[in-house]
Amino acid sequence: MPTLDDILEHIGEFGLFQKQVFFVLCFMSAAFPPIYMGVIFLGFTPEHRCLSPGVAELSSRCGWSLAEELNYTVPEQGRHGESFSSQCRRYDVDWNTTGLSCINPLENFTGYGNRSSIPLTPCQDGWVYDSSGSSIVTEFNLVCEDSWKVDLFQSCVNAGFFLGSMYIGYIADRFGRKLCLIVTILVSATSGVLVAFAPSYLWVVIFRFLQGLVSKGSWTAGYILITEVVGPSHRKTVGILYQMAFTVGLLLFDGVAYAIPHWRWLQLTVTLPCFLLLLYYWCLPESPRWLISRKQNDKAMKIVEYIAKKNGKKLPAHFKNINLEEEDGENLSPSFMDLVRTPQMRKNTFILMYNWLASSLLYQGIIMHMAMADIHWLKVTVGCIGRMGITVSIEMVCFVNTELYPTFLRNLGVMVCSSFCDVGGILAPFIVYRMAEIWHELPLIVFAVVGLIAGGLVLLLPETKGKTLPETIEDVENLHRQENPREKIIYLHVQTQEVAHSKCDRSLAQ
């Protein structure tokens, strides 16, 4: 029986149909950055200081400039060796006292010989922020003792990514790529709108967590869908371009964020267009490769015929049926145990898990380490080269991940392995900031060791260039062989025909 890749070679590996599917799915990839990197703008922390009752009236009466007001009423930055004082402490004095001098009002308070002897108190009346816009930080006062809540805001998204990876992949492999795509888009968009209207920080975190649960799953389902409908010769290019759409979306998000400095309006602006992605229900077909894996060959053939018609091709007469060649009794229901049941599957899974973790750890860790302090231009150059290399690594591990799992397990395999990307993101700040306290360069040594191990483990994975996507676990187990099984079958078939012709010629000669 012919495989889907055999048929795509005749009806178009990347024709008009595949180009249209790829184009519309790129919109979803471009819509993912506001969720993945949204904390940069939604959780922006501007310069701030304690709100001291009476200071505004005194400043207005004395005609102070902002610099004079800060000099007279805000504790000196760096007092007691900390910059914390000027942002999280205020003078424990009553600025509404009558008769305060406009030259040096602190001298009017008796009992204090100099400024350093004036006691400080926490910001009991809130803060003043030097920003014309707003963020969750300015609205919910997530500064000083509550600054950790900004980290929690982003950690909840990563936690959602991690937990969602465990079940969204199963849903896509069990119920289909298209259904998974539509449901996760709807939940993600709805949660995004609820974030914009959340009345308190707690609800912001809850709705943000819900976004994380489904948003990465929708991005991955789109990636799997596009790689399953194109031919082998275009699969790598399409996978890389799909990830490039994420970068384009990130650039657009930067521009929108600078144009809309208020976090609730920004959240609505980047979320509401996501509801248009629900049009995928009418624009996208189900993956014919998934339908074949679920033994729904009739539905798969209808989609194949539509692809041929859309590409201006005619389905050859001898391709009237398509079948999944499988082992007798092989279970085609996705299971977590299938990822580690057989030797090659187990090896691929563990290596890919480590490479996802290493790629994320190095990418985020290098960025954090470069931002810690002023460093030599040579280190900046090498760091940028390292970031470029690890970016390519992330694209490759994502692409290879799809090629090392059978169709009925592909989405689950990618989601489970890529969940370790979120583990790397959680570990990165601890490695960078805690180890740098021991020795500033120690994190870089750790990154180098982790990267070298990841590169060595990749050499143990089978080469997938020129190979068809595996349909069964048996196909995955055979990927490590040098020859392509399909090419071998074709070769033997041709050889048999040649032998038959030779025998026929000898019979006629006699």
Image: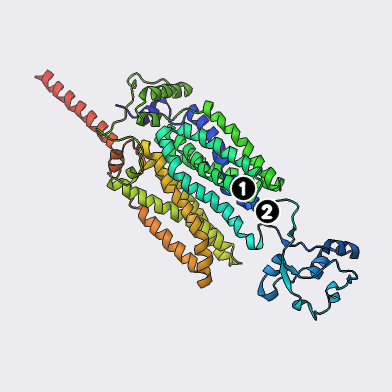
Question: Residue 151: image x %, image y %?
Answer: 58, 56
- Relative horizontal placement of residue 362, taking residue 247 as reference (left or right): left
| Residue displayed at 74% across by 74% down | 119
What is the quadrant of residue 4 in the picture?
Answer: top left
Q: Position of residue 134 (x, y in %)?
A: 71, 51
Taking depth in this image into account, of 482 and 180 the one nearest to the observer is 180
Name the residue: 40% across, 34% down: 174
The crowd level at tag 2 (other Cα within 10 Å; few <14, some 14-19, many 20+) is few
Quarter of the picture holding the N terminus = top left
Based on the displayed image, in which of its 4 quarters is residue 150 positioned? bottom right
- Image: 456 above or below 418: below
Give the crowd class for mark 1: few <14, some 14-19, many >=20 residues within 10 Å.
some
Q: Secondary structure at mark 1?
A: helix
In front here: 142 or 4? 142
* Residue, disc 1: 204
Residue 263 x %, y %: 68, 47
In this rendering, position of residue 131 left or right of residue 333: right
Q: Which residue is mark 2?
A: 140
Distance of mark 2 from mark 1, alpha carbons? 11 Å
Q: Earlier in the sequence, mark 2 or mark 1?
A: 2
- Taking 191 as reference, is 415 left or right? left
Q: Amino acid at mark 1?
A: Val
Residue at the (57%, 33%) spot, across then down = 277
Disc 2 marks a residue whose amino acid type is Phe
Question: Cβ–Cβ below 8 Å for labels 2 and 1?
Answer: yes
User: Quick one: SS at disc 2?
Assistant: helix
Quadrant of residue 235 within the rendered picture: top left
Q: Eyeballing the image, is 508 above or below 206?
A: above
